[in-house]
Amino acid sequence: MFKNLQRELERLGRMKEISVPIESDSEGYLDKECPSASCLFFFKIYGEDWSNIVRDEEVFCPSCGHVAPAASWYPREQVEAGRSYALGTITNSMNKAMRADATASKRRQHRNSFLSINIDAKGGKDAVLVPVAATEPMRLRTTCENCGCRYSYVGAAYFCPSCGANSASHTFMQTLNASRTAAGLGDTLRNTLEPDDAAVMIRTLLEKAIQDTVMSFQRLNEQLYERQSGKTARRNVFQNLDKGSELWAAEIGHGYVDLIGQIRLDQLRIYFQQRHLLAHQQGIVDQDYIDRSGDQTYAIGQRLLIRDSAVNEFADLVEELSQQLIVKLES
């Protein structure tokens, strides 16, 4: 009487897995999520690159660098949707088998029989099987300079998910963009926080932006120098504009002044010295700062006041110098 249902139960008992179709977004990217509980960074990888470039053995989190096999990177929401899809698949097969048994039972009944037993399968509508859809495309997209893998994300990413390469030039531009973003948060913070809290937060963000810009410039120059010369530059040499310029002049015949001119270089020197003061003197002006920067707007004992316009100007100057250096290296 329940032959179809029994056969279906036996088939399901032998089944080891259920294939769950996963759709890409409108631009062909697949959703991924870092499996590290402390990170859970959400990003996307171009579908063809996930199949053809990314290795099954290891995938790298673009944010924290966590490494795990390719099967570990399905987003939590996607896993839950996959479970629902798998359950729907089983529900559909069970419903179909029970309806088949009910139909077969009705065919076997004789119209004039003294006693008849009918099976009627009611309810249990088939589950609608919808492939797991991807989220909307993300704003930021990049292609790894090392392996060519295409991926996208929101926020900041430092590692290629396919090969784990950490591109200094990519990180450099992200840092400058983050600095510019920090410079534009003043009004938002003032409108959402208490005045004192807003003032502290704004000052912290702007000062951090100055320091991050120098550190990213340093790392970019270190990578470019090693690529150009085959040598490793002395540690932190590119935090000092004069020494970094001398190193490039010896290597390619052009220093920083040749790339952006004396006026811009002098302004850059002020910002670099302000970064040094923030990192080592808590922003308190001393004679050494005045001598090295040429900045006469402060007196000894005053504290630096970093404005959003300064952060933006610094980012623009550093970007211009870096772009001119890259052009010179590629020519």
Image (spheres, helix red, strand yellow):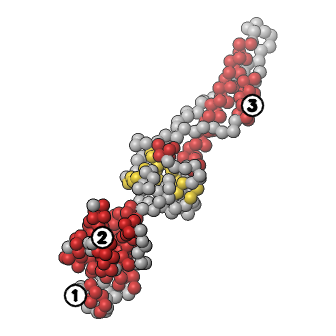
Residue at screen point 62% across, 34% down? 89
Q: Residues within 10 Å of mark 1 (few under 14, many from 20)?
A: few
In terms of sequence position, does the residue under pointer 1 or pointer 2 come before the other? 2
Q: Name the residue under label 1.
A: 296
> How many residues crowd mark 3 within 10 Å: few (<14), some (14–19), many (20+)?
few
Judge whether 48 appears above or below 146 on screen. above
Identity of the residue drawn at 47% across and 60% down: 165
Let me know if residue 94 appears in the view: yes
Decide: is 247 above or below 152: below
Q: In which quarter of the image is the N terminus?
A: top right
Q: Position of residue 85 (x, y in %)?
A: 58, 39
In the displayed structure, would residue 123 be above or below residue 312?
above
Q: Do the residues labelled 2 and 3 touch (CB within 8 Å)?
A: no
- Residue beneath label 2, please? 252
Q: Real-space Cα distance between discs 1 and 2?
A: 34 Å
User: SS class of the residue under badge 3?
Assistant: helix
Q: Name the residue under label 3.
A: 10
* Foreground of the two, 322 or 101: 322
Q: What residue type is labelled 1?
A: Gln
Disc 2 secondary structure class: helix
User: Do residues under tags 1 and 2 come within 8 Å of each other at their CB atoms?
Assistant: no
